[in-house]
């Protein structure tokens, strides 16, 4: 049982390192992480009475 937990911890560490590396290196390979930017306009009705 201890071996399985040890391997899961190793897998979690390697996966975290891979995810961080992909976040930093991804834009060089064409991965775009920025959200689509659109302008949103909504009318606002103010009751100042």
Image: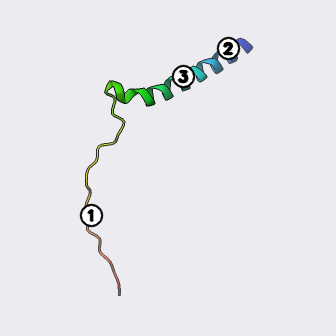
Label 2 sits on residue: 4
- Element on which disc 3 rests: helix
> Which residue sits furthest right?
2
Q: Which residue is mark 3?
A: 15
> Residue 2 versus residue 11: which sits nearer the camera?
11
Q: CA distance from mark 1 to mark 2?
A: 54 Å
Give the spatial CA distance, label 1 vs label 3. 42 Å
Q: In this figure, which residue is indicated by the disc labeled 1?
A: 42
Density class for disc 3 (Cα within 10 Å; few <14, some 14-19, many ≥20) is: few
Q: How is the image coloured?
A: rainbow
Q: Residue at x 69, y 18 (%)?
A: 5
Can residue 1 be seen in this snapshot? Answer: no
With 12 as the anchor, is 47 left or right in this view?
A: left
Q: What residue sits 26% from the left and 63% below the top?
A: 42
State which quadrant residue 16 falls in: top right
* Front-most of residues 44 and 24: 24
- Left or right? Give the position of 22 relative to 44: right
Q: In which quadrant will I find the N terminus?
A: top right
Residue 48 in the image: state x and y as whole percent: 35, 84
Helix, strand or loop for disc 2: helix
Marked residue nearer the N-terminal end (1 or 3): 3
- For mark 2, does the 10 Å Cα neighbourhood hold few (<14), some (14 to 19), or many (20 or more) residues? few
What residue is shown at x 44% (from left), y 26% (from top)?
22
Observer able to see residue 25: yes
First of labels 1, 2 by sequence position:
2
In the figure, 8 relative to 23: above or below?
Answer: above
């Amino acid at each position: 049982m201890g071996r399985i937990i040890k391997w899961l911890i190793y897998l979690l560490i390697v996966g975290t390192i891979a995810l961080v590396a992909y976040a930093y290196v991804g834009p060089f390979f064409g991965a775009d992480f920025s959200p689509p930017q659109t302008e949103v306009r909504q009318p606002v009705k103010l009751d100042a009475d």
